[in-house]
Each structure stands twice: as C-alpha cells, then as structure tokens.
Image (cartoon, grey):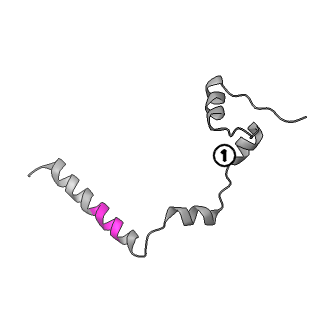
Amino acid sequence: MSPSIRISDETKAKLEAVKREDETFDELLDRLAITRTKEDVHEMAGFAEEGIEEHMKQKREDLNDSFEARTTGPE
C-alpha cells in the first residue's frame, strides 16, 4: 500500500494550480521536492571573493561605533 499524506483543502488547491495537466500528484511533489547537494548550494550562493570577511567585520565595527556614538550622546 502506498503512503498517504494529509493536506488542507487550501494546500490542495495550491498544488492543483501548479500541477501540469498530464502529471500525477506524486510526479508533482517529486518535481517540487528538489534535492540539493552541498556543491549545488555553494554554486547558487555566489560566495564572495577573498577579503570580504575582513571588510564586513570592519563595516560592522564602524556601524557599532556609529550607533554607540549616537546613543550615548555628548559627555
């Protein structure tokens, strides 16, 4: 026997809206449930060039200093 899943009427309507005419619900869910490898994620993320970490750290420190200067006011 095949497993079954319970979904709301609203979810079923959403799935029906994206389901292709010649596609079963199993095929639809298989198409939507894309498996991503670590390499896929790395490629899609567009990882930054070298040196960006130090640049981001410096900008964060600059923002923290600026925020502190505005919140503490003149002494």
Quadrant hosting residue 42: bottom right
Q: Position of residue 23 (x, y in %)?
A: 74, 40
At a point 73% along the width and 28% down the height, the residue shown is 6
Of 22 and 74, the residue lying toward us = 22
Mark 1 neighbour class, 10 Å CA radius: few under 14, some 14 to 19, many 20 or more: few
In the rendered view, does 9 fall on the left or right side of 54? right
Q: Is 59 covered by the magenta stretch?
A: yes
Of 27 and 2, the residue lying toward us = 27
For the N terminus, give its image quadrant.
top right
Q: Which residues make up the magenta segment? A: 55-61
Residue beneath disc 1: 32
In the rendered view, does 66 fall on the left or right side of 18? left
What's the magenta bit mostly, secondary-structure-wise? Answer: helix
Q: Considering only vertical position in the picture, is 71 above or below 44?
A: above
Q: Considering only vertical position in the picture, is 50 above or below 43?
A: below
Quadrant hosting residue 43: bottom right
Q: Considering only vertical position in the picture, is 15 above or below 69?
A: above
Q: Position of residue 44 (x, y in %)?
A: 54, 62
At a point 43% along the width and 76% down the height, the residue shown is 50
In the rendered view, does 33 fall on the left or right side of 52? right
Numbered marks: total: 1
Q: Position of residue 70 (x, y in %)?
A: 16, 50
> What's the residue type where badge 1 is placed?
Leu
In the rendered view, does 51 fall on the left or right side of 73? right
- Which residue of the protein is positioned furthest toward the front in this rendering? 21
- Which residue of the protein is positioned furthest toward the left in this rendering? 74
- Secondary structure at numbered mark 1: helix
- Which residue of the protein is positioned furthest toward the bottom in this rendering? 50
At a point 76% along the width and 32% down the height, the residue shown is 5
Q: Position of residue 31 (x, y in %)?
A: 69, 47
Q: Is 15 covered by the magenta stretch?
A: no
